Image: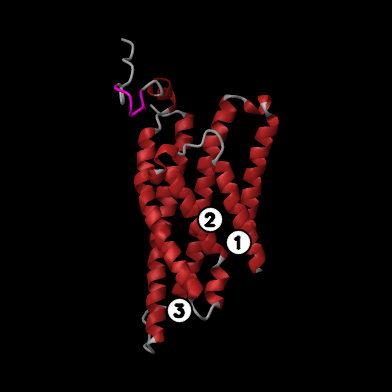
Amino acid sequence: MALNLKDYILLLHPAIAAAVVFPLIGMVVKMAWQTRQRRLETAQGSKSKLPPSVGSEHVALGRWLTGAVIGIVLLALANDIYGPIIEGQLWQKDPAKVSLISAFFVATIAAFVLLYKAQARLWRAVFATLTGMGLVILGAQEGVYRDDKHWYISHYYHGIAACMLMIFALAILREIYQDRSNRWRTVHIVLNCAALVLFVGQGFTGSRSLLEIPLSWQKSHVYQCNFDNTSPQYKTCPTPAAK
């Protein structure tokens, strides 16, 4: 078996995305389309064949989708951050830093849970902001694979952007149903269409990242390769020793 325990842990993020997140995206998009169709048919005075429950089902699945997206992002960040900490035994060398990082994880999860429960607009704004800040701060830690040079096609940056849109959509959920002018509904549609484009792109950038991250036992050799595109030896690796 070529995979070690570290490699299996690394695969949890894409496995959950493929098994849970992307099917949820498909269901949420379908329910969103049906909800809009029913609203338009009702507004025209005709009787819709779609059941009234499509709206509530769309909301419920959307809440599940937001939780799943934030959950797998936190899982990926935890793997990237705590992997080097465990390997380097950083908790012995710098326990204050490890404690602070752990506190940010706990605070981010707590803020996200409270965002689900908050009713008042002010508290929803506060917990949404704290959740977003927590993800950005954790994503800035050492060990997180961001691919800063190619940020415009980076799986990390597109994922964080999608998270922010999902958090915002969850925070304005009550406003969508209370606003008679439909302004918040329009904002919701536009931002979630942008999130859908990002999610489609995540399928490509995620596959690309999996190709770029070597297996744990291959790192010592792969990281000796030349990744400098200005070098004549670009995309070359040292010749392995003879068996």
| Picture coordinates of residue 63, whole percent (x, y) | 52, 62
Q: Quadrant of the N terminus?
A: top left
Mark 1 packing: few (<14 Cα in 10 Å), some, or many (20+)?
A: some
Q: Earlier in the sequence, mark 2 or mark 3?
A: 3
In this rendering, position of residue 135 left or right of residue 186? right
Between the residue at mark 3 and the residue at mark 1, the CA separation in whole angstroms equals: 24 Å
Please state which amino acid type lies under the numbered disc 1: Tyr
Which quadrant of the view contains residue 167? bottom right
Give, as a single range, the part of the protein colored magenta: 226-232
Instruction: Give the main secondary structure, helix, strand or loop, of the magenta stretch.
Output: loop
Q: Nearer the viewer, mark 3 or mark 1?
A: 1
Seen in the picture, residue 161 relative to 231 is either above or below; the reply is below
**Element assignment for label 2:** helix
- Secondary structure under tag 3 reads loop
Where residue 165 sits: x, y (%)? Answer: 49, 58
Q: Which residue is mark 2?
A: 67
Q: Is any part of residue 147 visible from this angle?
A: no
According to the image, label 1 marks what residue?
116
x and y percent of residue 81 in the render?
55, 35
Q: CA distance from mark 1 to mark 2?
A: 9 Å
> Which residue appears at 62% of the width and 25% of the height?
89
Quadrant position of the C terminus in the picture: top left
Instruction: Name the secondary structure under disc 1.
Output: helix
Q: Residue furthest front?
A: 230
- For disc 2, the neighbor class at 10 Å (few under 14, some 14 to 19, many from 20) is some
Determine which residue is flagged by label 3.
52
- The reply to whether discs 2 and 3 touch (Cβ–Cβ < 8 Å) is no
User: Which residue lies most toward the top here?
Assistant: 242
Q: Nearer the viewer, residue 97 or 72?
A: 97
Of marks 2 and 3, the one in the foreground: 2
